[in-house]
Amino acid sequence: MNADIRSPHLDLGDLIAEAAGQPIGDRAREHLAGCEHCQLEANRWNLVADGVRGLAAAAPEAAAAPEGAQPARLRRTRQRGPKGPWRRALLVAGSAAAALVLLVGIGTVTGLVHVHLGGPSTEAALTAVTGCTQLEQADGTLAHVTGDTLVIKTASGQPVTVTTTASTFVSTSGPLLSDITDGASVMVRGYGSGGTIAAAVITVGQPFSAVNPAGFVLVQGTVSDASTAGFTLATSGGTRVRVTTSSDTLVVVPHASLGQLQAGSSIFAVGQAGPDGTLSARGVAAITQLPSGPHIGVSVKDCSSSSIIEALDALSAAPR
Amino acid sequence: MNDPRGDAGAPVFTVNSDGACDDAGLLRRIGQGDEDAMAAFYREHGRVVLAQVLLVTGERVLAEEIVQDTMLAVWRGAGSFRGESSVRSWVIAIARRQTRDRLRHQRLRVVDDAFLADQPGSGPGPEVTALDRAELAEVKGAIRELALPHREVLGLAFGSGLSLPEVAGVLDIPVGTVKSRLAAARTALSRILDEKGQDQ
């Protein structure tokens, strides 16, 4: 946090560390979670960082180039330089391994985000995210959460350590009706009949999903009279609508805390590959309504945080 | 320890239990002339170094030559690594010196710190608004137009996996100066985006 008592906001070092995916202190993290000014600043730095990483991601093709040039230089300078083995290694380093995943489009969610479902994977624990070369994903079953770190067990049984920061988007979804309380701002998607909406998907708090399956009505408002059977939704225009819920109602909670994630949930983390096979997550979604096991690859429109949130949100709203 | 000059057996890398290469161990082996260790070192760091040098020079062929020179310097000087910094920041510092030497020979104008002293204002101005409106592709294009020191510090901070103190070590400036240089870089970036927005 800022040592300057005149400013209540995060200092530049925290904002930069956050954008760089490096740890910041608990106080700074708590402040960021509740400070709109700092979140805006963090988003600006994230955009700058995304731009740099996007340019860096364009470099790997050139990584193989020294195969031809390096040995020539070494011969010319007559140094005790590497010969055959290095050449071979550079060839390997410069060639991208093709991921062989059976991709079958679910096609149920949205035209904005493309979600693919494949069979169990025995390949690398981190897999590519289509649409952004510097992003990778880990998916599987949530094993446990310790502090800011969670461990995902992939379909092939590999554990993957996922680190998070204050700006990591964390969401959870499932039959979480207890998260709908009086005063909560929600968006309800469901079937309307006789002035009542039978809720299929309820999103609690921003960002509200852009996804709206065909045939659903969509209403936003504030919850009152919440019970296990439903609640009354008051819209900004003053209309009051009765919403019924059931065990089939899917509740999506964006901006959840890691503590809300349930071990055993299907979980998806998207971010940058870190050291030792870890993933520095920019977005995490725990989705209890999806069966664990099959690999699901997510495509994003671009590398921005909003695209990641959009992709995870679409997954979270996927039907059982 | 693998003996690269030995005849028997396949090369053995120093690998942690989770599969990650031990950088310091690699350097020790490189210092002993182990070519396999050099190859592993290249795989571990070559991409990041190339990305950083490419960001600074903007010329792919030149950047690749600089990376070659850097790796050659690693091959020659691995034994001089004393572990006072991370291996990543050590090799990037070597690459930076190689880049500086090349650019000096090309007589490129290097912008000094006085030029970089343009600090961002205290409140969100039109430049910040431009950044709020910008798409990622526009930001990437604008980064390419930044002055060399701005590109360099952004690359080190966000593209190389270095902490701010490590960036300060590579640039040989205080951490506070790294922060102010980053802030100045963002301001310059925003101005470029703002100008492009006004042109459209």
Image: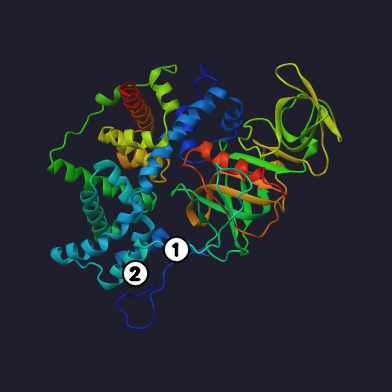
Mark 2, Cα crowd under 10 Å, few <14 / some 14-19 / many 20+, is many
The answer, for residue A222, to whether it is visible in the render is: yes
Q: Residue at x 50, y 64 (%)?
A: A100
On screen, residue A97 above or below B81: below
Describe residue B120's horizontal placement relative to residue A254 as left or right: left
Q: Which residue appears farthest toward the bottom when viewing the image?
A: B8
Measured from the top left, where is residue A89 in percent x and y? 34, 67
Describe residue A31's horizontal placement relative to residue A132 as left or right: right
The one of A162 and A50 positioned closer to us in this rendering: A50
Measured from the top left, where is residue A231 in percent x and y? 82, 29
Q: What residue is pinned by disc 1?
A: A98
Dot 2 falls on which chain? Answer: B
On screen, residue A97 above or below A189: below
Q: What residue is pinned by disc 2?
A: B36
Q: Residue at x 46, y 35 (%)?
A: A46
Q: Amino acid at mark 1?
A: Ala
Q: Quadrant of the N terminus of chain B?
A: bottom left
On screen, residue A152 above or below B108: below
Q: CA distance from mark 1 to mark 2?
A: 24 Å
Measured from the top left, where is residue A192 in percent x and y? 77, 32
Describe residue A173's horizontal placement relative to residue B37 as left or right: right
